[in-house]
Amino acid sequence: MKRKGGSRTPAASGGSPETRHRLRIRVVLWCFLGTYAVVCLRLAMLQAYPDPKYSREDSKHIGTIEIPVPRGNIYDSNGVVLATDQTVYSLWADPSRIENAGELASRLSALLDLDPGEIQARLQKSDANGKLLRFSWVKRWLAQEEVARLSSDGVLKKGLNIRPEPLRFYPQGELAAPVLGFTNLERKGGEGVELQFDKYLSSTPGIRKSRKDARRHLLNSLTLEYQEPEGGDDLYLTIDAVLQQILEKELDKRIEFAKAPRAMGMLMDPRTGAILAMASRPAFNPNRYWEYEPELYMNRAIVDAFEPGSSFKIVAASAAIEEDLITPETRIDCENGGFNPYGHYIKDYHSLGVEPFTTCFAQSSNVAIIKVGALLGRERMDEWIRRFGFGQRTSRDFPKENPGLHRPIKKWSGLTMGSLPMGQEINVTMPQLARAFAVIANGGYLIEPYVVDRAVGRDGIETYDHIMVKPARILSQETADTMRNLCHMVTMDGTGDSARIEEYEVAGKTGTAQIAKPGRGYVPGLFTAIFAGFAPVKDPKVVAVIIVQEPEIKLHFGGYICGPVFKEVVKEALVRLHAEPDSIPEQPKPETAPTEPEEQDPDTVLASEPGSEDEPSADAMLGSLDGLELVQHVKDPLGGPVLPDLRGLTKSQARARVVALGLEWDAQGSGWVISQSPEPGTSLKDVTKCLLNFSDERPMAKASNETEHTNETISAQ
């Protein structure tokens, strides 16, 4: 029996259940996909084009801090700290939050010892548009007592803050200040090695960006960005702080003694070029560099150029010996101390006659060295000056070094060959002079002075190491040994006896140079006193140059002023270097013991004034390069050699003269020769023995008509 109304078909009821189920699934799926697409699109838009309010909100949960690294330390050769960073505190203000700037400025003025008007200007500092700034320094680098006063007074309130910051600190004060230099307010090197090696010493802080917790502390586990700090390498110098202190102390004492405005000194290892000490006085305190005149910032030891005077005679002497033109025994006619080969009269203090070159060099004869220069000639003289490194910078460590002044031959005058051999018409620097003496000390090699040994990073890895340039040999070992002995004689029986050290054999050369005018000629009464040398003679470990500029005392000579400084600092250096003392035989007592030094000096070369007694005659001014002889060939009226006049000579000078003539001698007394037998002018064929009488009272003048004779004549080449 069928139900009334008939049965319903699947189509009429919307399909089978499976069909309806699949339809519902599709609808839900498409709704889900649509919603997902909208969300993804929205996220993409937020990522690409975020709403500023979300960025601001997110930034509140992210913090950034700097990871500071101090500027690298500077150490001496023994690890003594010469420069480092220390933390100090500085006062700053937020002018936009200061309410009563005038009242606050008055309070701060009493606490900080500053002008209240200056403080108020800083508290009200504004930009170009007149808007108050958010930051303004009130006072940098507060002292501890100032920090304490600010804290106890309660002035630190809204708008005022104290900030810690690094400050360059030099624990040794003025010690080696021109060598070290200083750092400016931007913590960049201002002078010296602080400037030259700034790329190693300076540091760049690292950066860490992380999310914050509820207490606004950075979370290391949620670091978003990290940048490693860089730089801050430590620098190790060749300077020995103890020797540096001794050198500066002795120079300061000599400045006071000589009433001089300036002095310089340098100690160097002649084998490597390592500078053990370098000083220019007066100096400055790099901890308060802004309180000093800028001219004191310069390292005058490498900037100042000067005429070297007789200390330069080692160049012509070394060159002539190396070229086999002379030997230490070569006898030279010193013309009784007066000479005019180039139209410029030269006078020696010691009126030497015919002497071996050893004596001429020890007594610093200008006449002798000019004759030696004539043997070399212009081209070879110029070549050897340049071989010794004059006229060029000596070191990569000194970019501001003065190269000195050595003119090319084409600019030489007719007087140049009468000036250059004895250290005039040329300007040199202290490192150049030290390097020249190092050539003799180290056996003939031209080395490079340097002051920075190495730089070491925070990880212990060397970032800089001084690479020694292979030194060039410019002298043979034999010539260097000969020059060592000649320089040794200068301190034993010459102008440098004040530099003699009891425990060590010393070699060197004195110099007393006039100071040239900017144009031509010399400034009357102004001199540069110089002593340069090395020790010990057999195995030199230290080269030293001591210079005192413009001494005002009457005895302004290089040996008298600079020799004692050399003696003290070199002795201390040799002790610190553990140099074995020399076995020096006991020296005989001086023939005379004057209570005061002589008022003249062999190293001082002064031009004769027109009309003076020293002015040569017209005939005497006809000398030239051609035919210039080391020893003049002189005959007596009968054609044979005669006995010279020995009166006025010291015992050592007289002995050398008599022995050179092949005679025996008998000395009576001590001091200077006052009489002789046979008489001067006696034919040598009639003389077998010469009797000399000495006296402690020096004769007023030596006979001017002395004649010198020799059987050998050496002409200039």
Image (tube, rainbow, N blue to C red):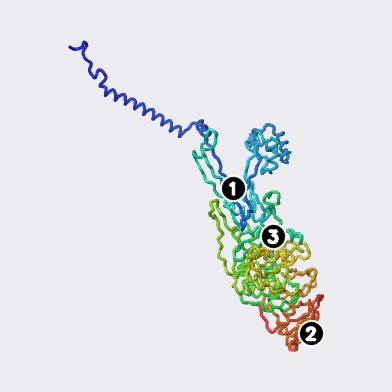
Question: Quick one: quadrant of the N terminus?
Answer: top left
Residue 365 visible in the picture: no
Looking at the rendering, which quadrant does residue 145 occupy?
top right
Q: Is residue 107 above or below residue 14?
A: below
Q: Which residue is mark 1?
A: 70
Nearer-N-terminus badge (2/3): 3
Q: Amino acid at mark 3?
A: Ile
Residue at the extreme top of the image, as rendered: 4
- Measure the C-alpha gap from mark 2 to mark 3: 53 Å
Q: Amino acid at mark 1?
A: Pro
Residue 464 visible in the picture: yes
Q: Is residue 633 above or below residue 506?
A: below
- Measure the C-alpha gap from mark 3 to mark 1: 31 Å
Q: On residue 677, which mark appears?
A: 2
Of 323 and 239, the residue lying toward us: 239
Identified at 80% across, 69% down, the residue is 595
Looking at the rendering, which quadrant does residue 510 occupy?
bottom right
Residue 258 x, y percent position in the rendering: 76, 62
Q: Amino acid at mark 2?
A: Ser
Residue 615 x, y percent position in the rendering: 77, 72
Residue 237 x, y percent position in the rendering: 61, 57
Q: Is residue 184 left or right of residue 67?
A: right
Residue 586 x, y percent position in the rendering: 71, 74
Local crowd size for mark 3, using a 10 Å CA cut-off: few (<14), some (14–19), many (≥20): some
- Measure the C-alpha gap from mark 1 to mark 2: 81 Å
Looking at the rendering, which quadrant does residue 490 occupy?
bottom right
Local crowd size for mark 1, using a 10 Å CA cut-off: few (<14), some (14–19), many (≥20): many
Q: Which residue is mark 3?
A: 246
Q: Determine whether the residue tagged by mark 3 lies in a helix, strand or loop.
A: helix
Label count reads 3
Of 448 and 500, the residue lying toward us: 500
